Amino acid sequence: RLGRGLALAACLARPRGEIEACLIDRILSRQFRDAHPEALRRIEALANAEPSSRVALAQLALAAAMHDARGSLARITAPTLVLAGEYDALLGTAAPRALAAAIRGATFAIVAGSGHDLTLEQPLTTAASVARFFAAPTE
């Protein structure tokens, strides 16, 4: 968790015009960025048109680094799906896998070909995974 927080903090230490690009590099996989340069330019333009404040981003990074719900996970009784991007440079697959393991009966799946932002990089695959999960009979 500390390493992820430091990686985000490193983005915040960049000059004003480079913060969003750094964050996009952390959230979108290299594979997606290389394969979809036009989409990447649109995403960067949107992020640069309304940049987040450094303070808000620092608060978000700090909250993410400090959040620890591990003690509550065993109390979850609802059917739970945990998805992870195959190329997620921000979380990797070990942390989401551990999250699923800590929730009784949770289903874990890796979304192939995706980084951290599953819905942006693999929207159809992600939607299909969620739809299958909700369509499956419950016990």
Image (cartoon, rainbow, N blue to C red):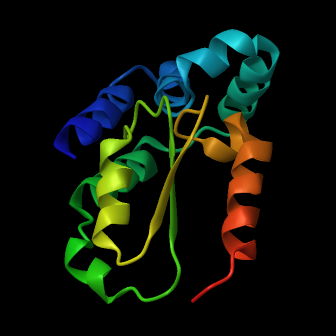
Q: Position of residue 126 (x, y in %)?
A: 69, 49
Residue at 35% from the left image edge and 47% from the top image edge: 58
Q: Is residue 11 left or right of residue 115?
A: left
Q: Is residue 5 left or right of residue 96?
A: left
Q: Is residue 49 left or right of residue 18?
A: right
Residue at 57% from the left image edge and 89% from the top image edge: 139
Nearest the eye: 66 or 45: 66
Instruction: Please say if 128 is above or below 19.
Output: below
Nearest the eye: 91 or 27: 91
Q: Position of residue 82 (x, y in %)?
A: 49, 60
- Residue 91, by quadrant, is top left
Nearest the eye: 48 or 121: 121
Instruction: Please say if 71 is above or below 96.
Output: below
Residue at 71% from the left image edge and 38% from the top image edge: 122
Q: Is residue 21 left or right of residue 2?
A: right
Q: Position of residue 86 (x, y in %)?
A: 50, 33
Q: Position of residue 55 (x, y in %)?
A: 39, 48
